[in-house]
Image (cartoon, helix red, strand yellow):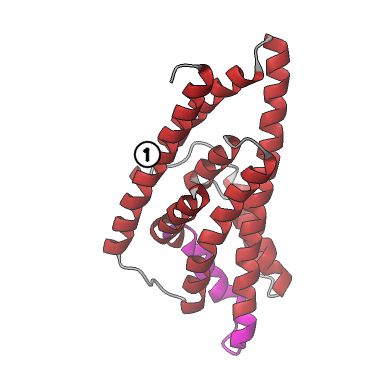
Amino acid sequence: MELTFLFLNASLMALSHCVGMCGGVVLAYCQSKFAPQTPLRIQLCAHTLYNLGRVSMYVLVGFLAFLGFHGLLEVLAKALDLPRMRLQGGVLVSVGVLMALFALGFFLHLKSPLGLSGGFFAKGFKSLFSTPSLPSFYALGLLNGLLPCGMVYWFVLNALARPNLASALEVMLVLGLATFAPMFVFGALFGNFLSSKWRAWFQKAAFVLLLGFAGHTIYMGAKMLGHA
């Protein structure tokens, strides 16, 4: 049931956020990588590969973040001589607070402070935009999946709060699959298929769900600490 709500949350965010933020990348590769005579089946295949690249990167980021995070927890638990559950409870509360902050940043359109070098992305996109081969669309999706994004950070934090690697990967896969259809349709239609009014509504609904999950994470952490 929780994954269903996460999927709904990601879908709302995709309709209100992803189309606007990553839609420019889609429009750019449509203009630079598709010729007027490019068959529709090739275009659809390209859109599929691009979105599969994004999904792959989201899952990979979740995988690496989860392993690194829980490995660090083990080291800290031993170094500080603290029970693992108590330490994890404190971390969950912190993660929940961060999730709430990222939710607020998403709603207020605040720029993320965790961005990577703009030059790296500029060079990567420039190179991939000039390459018409189908594999380059998958590579473009991989690069797009690394773009600084508060929405992705929120889902990574949610994944870190999971008890095991499998459930963490499920969270990131849900993010990828929920954003797949809106971005695919946007690319296929090559246009803006949602009015600003509907985007604003989806954004508000997503914000409420984001805060709800953040509150749930804080509650679970407090419960582990013995304060609930």
- Is residue 32 covered in magenta? yes
Q: Which residues are magenta?
A: 20-43
Tell me if residue 11 comes above or below residue 88 in the rendering: below
Choose top left, top right, bottom left or bottom right for residue 194.
bottom left
Residue most toward the left?
197
Tell me if residue 14 comes above or below residue 208 in the rendering: below
- The answer to whether residue 40 shows anywhere in this view is yes
Please state the horizontal and vertical placement of residue 143, each as a whole percent of the image: 64, 55
Q: Secondary structure at mark 1?
A: helix
Q: Amino acid at mark 1?
A: Leu
Density class for disc 1 (Cα within 10 Å; few <14, some 14-19, many ≥20) is some
Foreground of the two, 25 or 173: 173
Please state the horizontal and vertical placement of residue 56, each as a whole percent of the image: 67, 56
Please state the horizontal and vertical placement of residue 54, each as a whole percent of the image: 61, 58
The residue tagged 1 is: 104
Q: Residue at x 49, y 36 (%)?
A: 113
Tell me if residue 116 comes above or below residue 21 in the rendering: above
Foreground of the two, 151 or 143: 151
Foreground of the two, 72 or 90: 90
Q: Residue at x 49, y 47 (%)?
A: 2
Choose top left, top right, bottom left or bottom right for residue 218.
top left
Choose top left, top right, bottom left or bottom right for residue 67.
top right
Please state the horizontal and vertical placement of residue 101, each as a whole percent of the image: 41, 34
- The answer to whether residue 127 shows anywhere in this view is no
Q: Is residue 178 left or right of residue 204?
A: right
